[in-house]
C-alpha cells in the first residue's frame, strides 16, 4: 500500500492552528507526549511508548571474531526494522529513505558517541569478542519514531545482561543464565534523541511532532544529547532557513528534556532490578494485567481431569488393526527392482490387474500407464467422454 | 496419569488487551502464561497489482521475531497462519484488495504458534472483518514417561518426546491445522488431539466472554 | 471438448470425475502413483539419489566437507538441507531468491530429520571441538507435479543411506589432516521416516495428489511415519476435516511406509551388488 497523502486542507489547517499557538492534541509547543517504558522478562527486552507511538527493542549477543581494524573491541550494531505492523505502507526488508535515516541517526547517537564500553566486550584479542545487536521494531507509527527508538535501544542496552564465560586456554565455556549470574554492560553515558519539527521557515518550532505534524513540517531537527548536556549527534532534514541561534536555543531546551528522559530510564531500570531481586514475576504479561483494570483473567480455562476421559479401549484396537493390516499390504503394490541400482514401487489396482508398465531400456525408462478395459466402463459422465 | 493435584492438564493463564495499537484496524496483545505476542490486522486495504486477485482478497501474513531478521523457521509459521486466515476469512467479500495480518513476537516461553493463532483470531475479530468461523489453537507435549502436558512452557516442550499443535474451528470442532514434532504413535496422537480439543473449547469461551465485556464497556 | 470444459470449469470438471470415483489420470481416489528410486545417480557426490513419484522428480546430492564445530555444540557435526525449486521444474517458480514454498519445504524436511533422530549429529564428529563432518544435502526438483515433501524426504533418506565418508586422521599438534580415501564407511541411519501427502477436495480425501490436484484442493495433509511410529502429522491450515478422516489417512500411511522402506532397501542393495 502506498503512503497516504496529507491533503492541502489538512496542511493549511495545521499551519493556521500553529500560527495561533495551538496544536491539535492540545500540547504546548515544547511539551512532549507521555513516555512509558516497560521491560520484558528476557534481559534486554524493552517496550517503549511515546504517546501512541510504540517500539519494541531487543538486544542479542553472540561471540564473533573482531574486526581487524579494532582487534580489542566488541561489536555493536543497531538495526531499526520498520515492521508492517507500524503502518500499512511499511514493507519488510525494504530500504526506504526513512529506514536509512533512522538507522544512521541511531548509529551516530549510540555507537559513534561511544556510549557502550566496547573494550569490556573483548574476550580474546584478535580472536573472540562479544557482538551485540539491538533490534528495534516499530510497532505503531504515530510520529517521532526516532525519539522512541533511541530511548528503547538505550534502555534495552542498559537492561541487557550477557552470559558469563570462562576461558580455559583455547576453549571458551558459555555459562547459561541459571548457572552463573549474568554480567551487565558498562554504559559510559546515556545519549537520547530529541526531535523538533520546524514550520514557517523557523518561526514555529514544536517538540515531539505527531505523524501529521511530521508530514506538514518544512524540516525536522533531531538532536542527540546525553545527561552531561553533550551533543552526540545533530540532524537537520528537509528545507528550512534556520538561523544558528534557533538551533542553539533548541539544543538548550533539548538538554533539559534529555535529562528528564535519562532520569526516567534510570528510575525504571532501578525498579526493574529491585523487582527481580525480590523475585517478583516480571514481564509483559504482568505489566499488561496491572496497567488496566477491566481485564478479566480466565480462570475457567483450567481443565480438570474428571471431565477429561480418554477412551483407551478404542485406541488399543486401532493399533492392532494397523499391525494386522500390514501383512495384507503387499497385495496393494509391488516393489520391483530394475537393473542399474534402481527400484520401483508399483501400485496394483483393486482387481489385481497391473496397470503400470515398466521397461528398463534406456530409450524409454519411464513408467507408462496401460488403461485397462475395466476403466473404460467407469469413465465419468457424458460431458467429459466426448473427445 | 490419574493424579488430580498434578497440574499437567492446566492451561497457563490467558490474558488479552484489545486495541493496543492505533494504526492497525484491529490489534491485540495476547499472553498465554509467559508467552506474549501482539497481532495486528490491516484490511481490506489497497493491494499491489502483482498480488491482486479478481475474485477475492489476497491475504498476507508476516511473523516477526523480536530479534534478528525472520528466518526460514518463521516462514513455516507464516505459511501456517496464512493458510488458517485464508480458510477462516470470507475473502470473496473483498475482491481486489488485501488483508494483512502481522504477528509480532514479544516474549517466547513456549507455545508460540498457538499463541500467535489465537492472537490472530482475536485481531481479526477486533478488526470486524467477516469470518466463516472462529479458530482456536492449543498445544500439548508428551514427555518421556508418556504423560501429556497441556500448554507446555519452553522447558517442558524442549524436554518432551513429542510436541503437538492443533487448530480447530468453533462450529464442528474439526481440525484445521495440525503440526507436530518428535515421534509418537497413533494412540498418543488421538489422545493429544482430544486433549487439545477440550482446551480449545475453553478458548472459544474466552473469546466470547472477552468480546462481550469489550462491547459492554464500549456501550 | 473435454479440454475446453477443463479450462473453463476446472473444479466442476474435477468434481465430475471424483463423483465417479476416478481421477483424471485414471487412478482411484486412494491409489498412489508409481515411485522410482535410483541411487548413486551423481558420481561426484558422496551420496546421491534420484526419486520419481509419478512425474515429480527430485534429485538429492550430498557433499561432505570438513568443518570446525560450533562452540556451543563441540561434539556435533552438521547436516544442512536445501530444497531448490528452479524455474525448470514448473512455470510456477521464477528465478531469483528461494520461493516461500522452497523455504517452507527446506525447513520442514530439516526439522523432520532432526526430530526423527534418523541420523545422530554426534556420529559426524571426528575430534571434539576441532573437526567434524558437515554434510550439505542439496535437493533439486527437476519436475514439479505435487507431493514435493514426499519426494524430497525419500530422496534425502536414500541419499543419506548411500553416503560413504573416508576416514580422517587428524594430528592436533601440527594441525594436519590426512584423508584416507581408501577406507570409506557409511554413516549410521537409525530409522527411515517416509511421508505421504493427501489433498482435501470438498469432502473427499485424495491420495498422492498431482500438482493440478494440489492447486484445486483446499488443503494438504502430510503424514510422516518411521518404523511403525508417527513422526509428524502436518496439516498447515486449509479446510477443516474430521478426526475419522485424519485417522484413516494415518492408517493408510503406515501401510504404505513398509512398501517405501522395502523400495529404498531394494534400490540400495541393487547398488552394492
Image (cartoon, coloured by chain):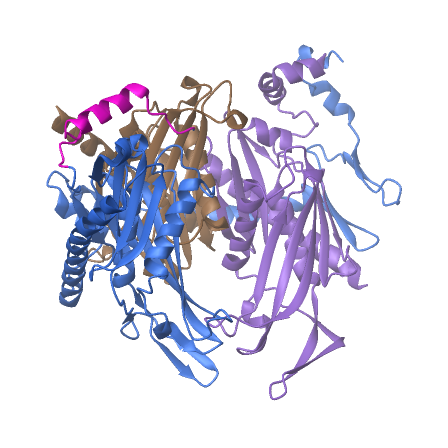
- The picture places residue A137, in percent across and down from the top left corner, at 35, 47
Which range is magenta? Answer: A2-28
Vertical placement of B198 versus C240: above or below?
A: below
Q: Is residue C131 above or below residue C164?
A: below
**Colour of chain C in the image:** purple
The hue used for chain A is: blue
In the rendered picture, chain B carries what hue?
A: brown
Q: Position of residue B71 (x, y in %)?
A: 48, 50
Q: Is residue A70 magenta?
A: no
Q: Nearer the viewer, residue C64 or C249?
A: C64
Quadrant (top left/top right/bottom left/bottom right) for the N terminus of chain A: top left
Identify the residue at horizontal 69%, vertical 14% (top origin). C4
In depth, the one of B114 and C134 nearer the eye is: C134
Place residue A361 in its image quadrant: top right
Q: Residue at x 56, y 51 (%)?
A: C109
Locate the C terminus of chain A by quadrant.
top right
Q: Residue at x 13, y 47 (%)?
A: A290
Instruction: In this rendered view, identify the residue nearer to me: C135 or A188.
Output: A188
Residue A312 makes an appearance in the image: no
Residue C109 appearing in the image: yes
A207 vs B163, left or right, is left
Magenta stretch encompasses residue A13: yes
Q: Residue furthest bottom?
A: C173
Q: Position of residue C228 (x, y in %)?
A: 54, 54
User: In the displayed structure, would residue A118 be above or below residue A167?
Assistant: above
Q: In the image, is A217 to the left or to the right of B15? A: right
Q: Position of residue C137 (x, y in %)?
A: 64, 57
Amino acid at each position: 500500500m502506498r503512503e497516504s497523502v496529507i491533503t492541502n486542507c489538512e496542511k493549511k489547517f495545521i499551519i493556521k492552528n500553529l500560527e495561533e499557538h495551538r496544536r491539535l492534541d492540545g500540547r504546548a509547543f515544547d511539551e512532549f507526549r507521555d513516555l512509558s517504558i516497560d521491560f520484558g522478562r528476557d534481559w534486554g527486552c524493552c517496550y517503549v511508548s511515546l504517546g501512541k507511538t510504540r517500539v519494541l527493542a531487543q538486544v542479542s549477543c553472540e561471540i564473533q571474531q573482531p574486526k581487524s581494524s579494532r582487534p580489542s573491541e566488541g561489536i555493536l550494531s543497531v538495526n531499526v526494522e520498520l515492521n508492517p505492523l507500524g503502518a500499512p505502507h511499511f514493507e519488510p526488508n525494504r530500504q526506504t529513505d526513512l529506514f536509512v535515516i533512522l538507522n544512521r541517526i541511531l548509529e551516530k547517537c549510540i555507537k559513534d558517541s561511544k556510549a557502550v564500553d566496547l573494550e569490556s566486550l573483548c574476550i580474546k584479542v584478535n580472536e573472540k569478542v562479544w557482538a551485540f545487536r539491538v533490534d528495534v521494531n516499530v510497532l505503531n507509527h504515530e510520529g517521532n519514531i526516532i525519539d522512541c527508538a533511541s530511548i528503547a535501544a538505550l534502555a534495552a542496552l542498559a537492561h541487557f545482561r550477557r552470559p558469563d564465560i570462562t576461558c580455559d586456554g583455547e576453549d571458551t565455556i558459555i555459562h547459561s543464565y541459571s548457572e552463573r549470574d549474568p554480567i551487565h554492560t558498562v554504559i559510559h553515558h546515556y545519549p537520547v534523541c530529541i526531535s523538533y519539527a520546524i514550520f514557517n521557515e523557523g518561526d514555529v518550532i514544536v517538540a515531539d511532532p505527531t505523524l501529521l505534524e511530521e508530514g506538514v513540517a518544512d524540516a525536522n531537527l533531531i538532536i542527540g544529547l546525553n545527561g552531561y548536556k553533550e551533543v552526540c549527534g545533530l540532524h537537520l532534514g528537509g528545507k528550512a532557513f534556520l538561523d544558528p541561534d534557533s538551533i542553539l536555543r533548541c539544543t538548550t531546551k533539548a538538554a533539559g528534556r534529555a535529562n528528564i528522559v535519562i532520569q526516567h530510564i534510570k528510575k525504571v531500570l532501578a525498579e526493574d532490578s529491585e523487582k527481580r531481586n525480590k523475585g517478583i514475576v516480571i514481564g509483559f504479561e504482568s505489566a499488561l494485567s496491572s496497567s488496566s483494570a477491566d481485564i478479566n483473567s480466565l480462570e475457567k480455562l483450567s481443565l480438570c481431569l474428571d471431565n477429561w476421559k480418554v477412551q483407551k479401549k478404542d485406541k488399543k484396537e486401532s493399533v492392532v488393526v494397523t499391525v494386522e493390516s500390514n501383512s495384507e499390504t503387499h497385495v496393494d503394490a509391488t516393489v520391483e527392482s530394475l537393473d542399474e541400482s534402481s527400484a520401483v514401487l508399483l501400485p496394483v489396482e483393486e482387481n489385481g490387474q497391473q496397470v503400470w508398465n515398466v521397461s528398463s531400456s534406456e530409450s524409454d525408462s519411464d513408467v507408462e500407464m496401460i488403461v485397462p478395459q475395466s476403466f473404460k466402463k467407469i469413465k465419468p459422465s457424458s460431458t467429459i467422454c466426448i473427445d | 496419569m490419574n493424579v488430580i493435584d498434578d497440574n499437567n492438564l492446566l492451561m497457563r493463564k490467558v490474558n488479552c488487551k484489545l486495541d493496543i495499537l492505533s494504526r492497525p484496524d484491529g490489534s491485540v496483545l495476547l499472553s498465554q502464561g509467559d508467552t506474549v505476542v501482539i497481532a495486528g490486522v490491516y484490511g481490506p486495504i489497497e493491494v499491489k497489482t502483482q498480488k491482486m486477485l479478481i475474485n477475492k482478497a489476497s491475504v498476507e501474513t508476516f511473523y516477526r521475531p523480536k530479534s534478528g531478521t525472520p528466518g526460514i523457521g518463521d516462514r513455516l509459521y507464516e505459511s501456517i497462519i496464512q493458510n488458517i486466515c485464508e480458510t477462516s476469512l470470507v475473502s470473496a467479500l473483498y475482491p481486489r484488495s488485501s488483508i494483512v495480518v502481522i504477528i509480532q513476537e514479544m516474549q517466547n516461553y513456549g507455545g508460540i504458534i498457538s499463541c500467535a493463532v489465537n492472537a490472530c483470531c482475536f485481531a481479526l475479530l477486533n478488526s470486524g472483518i467477516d469470518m466463516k468461523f472462529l479458530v482456536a489453537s492449543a498445544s500439548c507435549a508428551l514427555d518421556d514417561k508418556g504423560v501429556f502436558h497441556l500448554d507446555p512452557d519452553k522447558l517442558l516442550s524442549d524436554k518432551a518426546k513429542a510436541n503437538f499443535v492443533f487448530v480447530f474451528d468453533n462450529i464442528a470442532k474439526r481440525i484445521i491445522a495440525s503440526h507436530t514434532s518428535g515421534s509418537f504413535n497413533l494412540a498418543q496422537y488421538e489422545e493429544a488431539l482430544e486433549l487439545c480439543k477440550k482446551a480449545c473449547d475453553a478458548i472459544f469461551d474466552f473469546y466470547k466472554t472477552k468480546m462481550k465485556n469489550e462491547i459492554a464497556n464500549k456501550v | 471438448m473435454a479440454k475446453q470444459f477443463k479450462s473453463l470449469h476446472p473444479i466442476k470438471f474435477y468434481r465430475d470425475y471424483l463423483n465417479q470415483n476416478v481421477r483424471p489420470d485414471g487412478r482411484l481416489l486412494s491409489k498412489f502413483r508409481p515411485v522410482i528410486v535410483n541411487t548413486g545417480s551423481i558420481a561426484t557426490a558422496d551420496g546421491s539419489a534420484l526419486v520419481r513419484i509419478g512425474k515429480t522428480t527430485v534429485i538429492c546430492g550430498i557433499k561432505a566437507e570438513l568443518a570446525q564445530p560450533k562452540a556451543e555444540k563441540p561434539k556435533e557435526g552438521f547436516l544442512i538441507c536445501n530444497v531448490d525449486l528452479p524455474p525448470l521444474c514448473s512455470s510456477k517458480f521464477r528465478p531469483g531468491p528461494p520461493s516461500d514454498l522452497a523455504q517452507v519445504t527446506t525447513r520442514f524436511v530439516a526439522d523432520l530429520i532432526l526430530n526423527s533422530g534418523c541420523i545422530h549429529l554426534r556420529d559426524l564428529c571426528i575430534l571434539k571441538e576441532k573437526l567434524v563432518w558437515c554434510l550439505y544435502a542439496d535437493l533439486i526438483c527437476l519436475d514439479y507435479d505435487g507431493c514435493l515433501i514426499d519426494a524430497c524426504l525419500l530422496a534425502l533418506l536414500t541419499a543419506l543411506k548411500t553416503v560413504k565418508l573416508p576416514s580422517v586422521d587428524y594430528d592436533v599438534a601440527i594441525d594436519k589432516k590426512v584423508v584416507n580415501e581408501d577406507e570409506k564407511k557409511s554413516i549410521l541411519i537409525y530409522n527411515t521416516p517416509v511421508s505421504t501427502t493427501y489433498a482435501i477436495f470438498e469432502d473427499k480425501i485424495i491420495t498422492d495428489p498431482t500438482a493440478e490436484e494440489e492447486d484445486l484442493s483446499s488443503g494438504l495433509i502430510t503424514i510422516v511415519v518411521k518404523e511403525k511410529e508417527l513422526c509428524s502429522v502436518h496439516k498447515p491450515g486449509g479446510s477443516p476435516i474430521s478426526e475419522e478422516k485424519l485417522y484413516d489417512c494415518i492408517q493408510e500411511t503406515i501401510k504404505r511406509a513398509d512398501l517405501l522402506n522395502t523400495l529404498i532397501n531394494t534400490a540400495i542393495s541393487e547398488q552394492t551388488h
